[in-house]
Structure formats: C-alpha cells, structure tokens
Image (cartoon, rainbow, N blue to C red):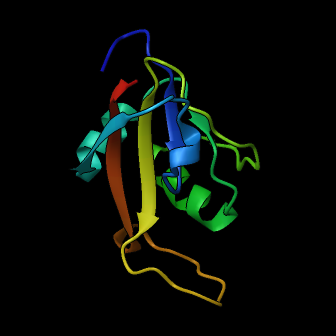
Amino acid sequence: MESNSRKVLVNAFSVSMLRFAREATVRFRRLNIEEVRELLRGEVVSYIRHAATVQVIQELVNRQIQPNNGIYVYEPNDTIIMVVLTTPQRGQEVVPRLEDLSFFLVEVLSLE
C-alpha cells in the first residue's frame, strides 16, 4: 500500500468500479482483524450505506465512519477494503456481528 493512497471501504466489488478499455487484473486477499484495523487508521472514505454494517466497523476501529450512498469509481493508488457478509442473506434485514463479516484487500494490478 502506498503512503499517499486513499483508503476506500466498500461492501461489494463490481467491474463497473473500474475504467479500462480492454483488460483489468484484480487480486483479492482475505484480511484478518488486525490487518483491517491497521488499514483503517487515518482517513477513510466509505461507500457502505448499510448502517448496521457501518456500526460494526466503527466498533472495530473505535471511531466514526459515515454511511454513504455514493457510487465508488476506482482511482489510481486507492487502497480498497471490501467487507461482505460471510454467509450472504437475501430478502431480510441483517444486523451483522463482527464474526458475520469477511474483509478483503482488493488490489487493482493493471488496467489496459
């Protein structure tokens, strides 16, 4: 992770987040809780709108993170931290606990 990178928190990853003409290479790496705490130090831009998920993350890092309805588009040097439910749920409101979440570092290796 570069020191001048923007830390971005998302709850999903979509190819529409990337701008590329022909090919993109992306790597996902599972993070442990200590790695998440370290990565989420300092300024974080959140693109998570689910308030209950944001609440769990706030408790993990012991500071405020705002829910956000914005649409994320990758910028070079972004550090993307993705948080997802370990077991996806459909058709019901979920109030997750920390153990219900999985965290991933999403690295954009190339855009062509």
Q: Residue at x 43, y 9 (%)?
A: 4
Q: Is residue 92 above or below residue 83?
A: below
Residue for point 47% across, 18% down: 76
Q: Position of residue 101 (x, y in %)?
A: 39, 67
Q: Residue furthest bottom?
A: 91
Q: Is residue 78 left or right of residue 94?
A: left
The quadrant of the picture occupied by the N terminus is top left
- Left or right, residue 105 beside residue 55: left
Q: Nearer the viewer, residue 93 or 70?
A: 70
Residue 55: name its quadrant.
bottom right
76 up-or-down from 106: above or below: above
Residue 82 point in image, percent of width and height: 43, 50
* Image coordinates for residue 64, horizontal then vertical, percent: 63, 41
The percent coordinates of residue 110 (x first, y second) are 33, 25
Q: Residue at x 52, y 51 (%)?
A: 14
Residue at the image position 43 percent from the left and 36 percent from the top: 80
